[in-house]
């Protein structure tokens, strides 16, 4: 193995996948970003949800430099991995949790809900999309269509892409890991987090451009280490913080 064998292989694989995912879905991404901008312009919220490792997309979207103040993460620490990974895996397969989690935020018709789920089949993400639609939210699935075609369905009998209003394919391999290395039966180097963050930030930047084209100031947080950022962010919190229990 050369000094840069594994590094170069993963770099090239993720670069190629990134290009394919964005270029093949460019019109879909533009439409979704336009809808995001419309939601923000109306003073409404964009919910983001994910379980297990997909919860990192909530962290990526929420309260960070260059991010939208309109984003509302549907947090539940038991669904993350830092408390109990086995419990997290069990809970995302249990029925009845989506209404409990989302109702807390009092979702309003006309808002938007992104659901990140790499396999696209577990009970809770699918249930969240169904319940979100019942509440009048535009639902967007981000998943691997290749994975969801072979993964076993939950008792709901539906895949996430079948129930969401809009779907973005993250292009991942079944099982998430991207690379096959000789001498190892299992793939290594997952792609869903890298590509998920890429997808989100592409949508974010495009939605900002939509807002500017409509002469609407985008509600974007600035890094607190930048001059004037504290005052700028406080103004955003005054407007967007009232309906967000995490701010």
Image (cartoon, rainbow, N blue to C red):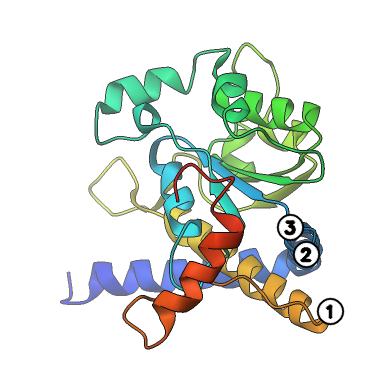
Identify the residue at image location x=27%, y=53%.
Answer: 182
Identify the residue at image location x=45%, y=77%.
Answer: 231
Residue at the far bottom: name it: 227
> Dot 1 corresponds to which residue?
214
Dot 1: within a 10 Å radius of its alpha carbon, few (fewer than 14), some, or many (20 or more) residues? few
Image quadrant assignment for residue 215? bottom right
Task: Give me the C-alpha separation between circle 3 and circle 1.
Answer: 14 Å
* Mark linked to residue 43: 3
* Mark linked to residue 41: 2
Image quadrant assignment for residue 9? bottom left
Circles 2 and 3: CB atoms closer than 8 Å: yes
Query: Residue 200 or 61: which is nearer the viewer?
Result: 61
Would you say residue 198 is visible in this rendering? Answer: yes
Would you say residue 152 is visible in this rendering? Answer: no
Label 3 element class: loop
Query: Residue 115 or 226: which is nearer the viewer?
Result: 226
Label 1 element class: loop
Circles 2 and 1: CB atoms closer than 8 Å: yes
């Amino acid at each position: 193995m050369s000094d840069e064998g594994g590094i170069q292989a993963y770099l090239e694989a993720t670069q190629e996948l990134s290009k394919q995912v964005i270029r093949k879905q460019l019109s879909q991404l533009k439409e979704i970003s336009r809808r995001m901008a419309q939601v923000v312009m109306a003073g409404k919220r964009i919910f983001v949800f994910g379980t297990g490792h997909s919860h990192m997309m909530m962290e990526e979207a929420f309260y960070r430099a260059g991010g939208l103040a309109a984003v509302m993460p549907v947090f539940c620490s038991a669904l993350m991995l830092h408390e109990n990974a086995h419990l997290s895996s069990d809970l995302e397969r249990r029925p009845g949790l989506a209404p409990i989690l989302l109702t807390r935020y009092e979702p309003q018709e006309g808002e938007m809900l992104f659901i990140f789920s790499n396999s696209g089949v577990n009970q809770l993400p699918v249930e969240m999309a169904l319940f979100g639609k019942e509440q009048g939210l535009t639902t967007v699935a981000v998943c691997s269509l290749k994975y969801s075609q072979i993964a076993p369905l939950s008792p709901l009998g539906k895949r996430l892409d079948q129930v969401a209003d809009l779907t973005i394919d993250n292009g991942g391999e079944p099982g998430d890991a991207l690379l096959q290395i000789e001498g190892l039966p299992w793939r290594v180097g997952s792609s869903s987090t890298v590509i998920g963050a890429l997808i989100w930030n592409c949508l974010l930047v495009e939605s900002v451009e939509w807002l500017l084209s409509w002469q609407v100031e985008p509600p974007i947080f600035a890094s607190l280490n930048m001059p004037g950022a504290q005052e700028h962010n406080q103004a955003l919190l005054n407007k967007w913080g009232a309906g967000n229990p995490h701010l």
